[in-house]
Amino acid sequence: MAVNDLQHVEKCIEDGALSKLLQLPSTLDDFSEASLIRSMGFFLKASEKQIVLATKDLSNDAIQKNLSWTKNKSSSPFSNRRCYAINIMLKQRFSPQFLQEAARSLPFDCVLSLIKYLHTVLLWLPAVPNKNESAPSLEHIIDWLNALLDSHVQQLKLAEDATEVVQTLYEQVTLMTKWQLETKALLGALAELNRQVEEQQRNTKMGNYCIEVISF
């Protein structure tokens, strides 16, 4: 009987093969959104001992090398090793639609924890992403946030402990949107200036060429 990817996930959790669980997305040909959400829920709730077991193949230095915020000494809601494990899941390929559907099975406390973490990662993301870091891309973060918000909208509206989480995220995204609009305006001015500089350089080169021909 064939074993699907979700069964592989459950088997790893049941057997305590947590290092294998963390590697499943890269070892299986297909890692569904349901498996992604199940794995994410586990790593969010796992004990610190389980997290250490899952990342046992990596040294502390290797973990820190992959986490840009440790270089800047920024505070994190999770340990470095838990951040690493969660980021592995956040970076996986997925369909936003299927992720939203699968996210309905994520316990609400995990939803709040993950939204808080994604908010923090938004603050950490560098202006120029480093491909060697384990941090998810801005596109992945936005897709994950959309999936979490859409799949748990009723609970997020009614739960008192969700109010501050949603409000602080809203304020951060508002600031980011304002910054993006302002940088777009700056980009337009810089593009025009760059065009004029290039035109001036072409005219100067053409002038120098004419002088050389006349001198000859």
Image: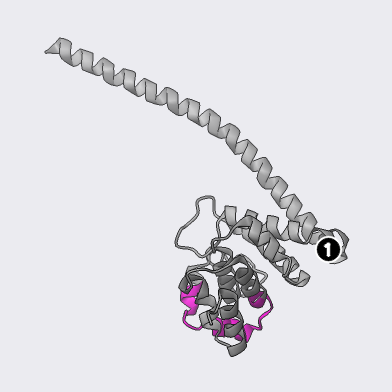
Residue 162 image point, x, y percent: 82, 63
Name the image quarter holding residue 196: top left
Q: Residues within 10 Å of mark 1 (few under 14, many from 20)?
A: few
Magenta segment boundaries in residue numbering: 42-63
- Can residue 139 be seen here? The reply is yes
The front one of 86 and 16 is 16
Q: Residue at x 55, y 71 (%)?
A: 84
Left or right: residue 192 versus residue 96 is left
Residue that mark 1 sits on:
155
Residue 107 image point, x, y percent: 75, 72
The front one of 91 and 68 is 91
Picture mark count: 1
Q: Farthest residue toward the top?
A: 214
Residue 181 image point, x, y percent: 64, 37
| Above/below status of 103 relative to 125 | below
Secondary structure of residue under mark 1 = helix
Residue 183 image point, x, y percent: 59, 38
Query: Is 178 contained in the magenta span?
Result: no
Q: Residue at x 37, y 21 (%)?
A: 200
